[in-house]
Amino acid sequence: EGYTHKEIGEMLEISENTSKSQLSRARKSLQKKLNALKEKEKKRIGKQPK
């Protein structure tokens, strides 16, 4: 929380660019999972009797 990519790289012994790319990949993965949950919820709500 509040760390720069340089600080993260130093702590994890990885490069600053690796820190940036891993964060980008993690965000994309999380977004994909959230979108899937959102679609699942839309389908579930759509099946409820009115």
Image (cartoon, rainbow, N blue to C red):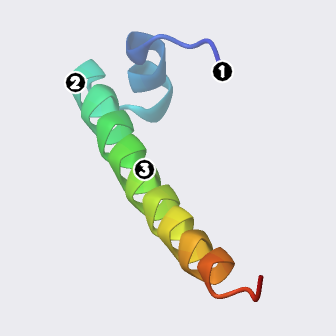
- Distance from disc 1 to disc 2, alpha carbons, whole Å, reads 18 Å
Q: Most extreme residue toward the right, as rendered?
A: 50
Question: Label 3: which residue?
Answer: 31
- Distance from disc 2 to disc 3, alpha carbons, whole Å, reads 21 Å
Question: Label 2: which residue?
Answer: 17
Horizontal and vertical percent for residue 15? 26, 25
Secondary element type, mark 3: helix
Q: Earlier in the sequence, mark 2 or mark 3?
A: 2
- Which amino acid, mark 2? Asn
Q: Nearer the viewer, residue 43 or 27?
A: 43
Horizontal and vertical percent for residue 6? 38, 12
Q: Vertical placement of 25 versus 12: above or below?
A: below
Circle nearer the viewer, 2 or 3: 3
- Which amino acid, mark 1? Glu
Q: Vertical placement of 7 versus 50: above or below?
A: above
Query: Going by the image, does 37 lie left or right of 12?
Result: right
Q: Most extreme residue toward the front, as rendered?
A: 50
Query: Going by the image, does 29 lie left or right of 50?
Result: left
Question: Label 1: which residue?
Answer: 1
Mark 1: few/some/many CA within 10 Å (<14, 14-19, 20+): few
Q: Which mark is residue 43?
A: none
Q: Nearer the viewer, residue 10 or 1?
A: 1
- Which amino acid, mark 3? Gln
The quarter holding residue 42 reads: bottom right
- Tally of numbered discs: 3
Residue at coordinates 67% horizontally, 76% vertically from top-left?
A: 45
- Distance from disc 3 to disc 1, alpha carbons, whole Å, reads 20 Å
Q: Vertical placement of 35 versus 46: above or below?
A: above
Secondary element type, mark 1: loop
Residue at coordinates 50% horizontally, 26% vertically from top-left?
A: 11
Residue at coordinates 47% horizontally, 23% vertically from top-left?
A: 8
Q: Earlier in the sequence, mark 3 or mark 1?
A: 1
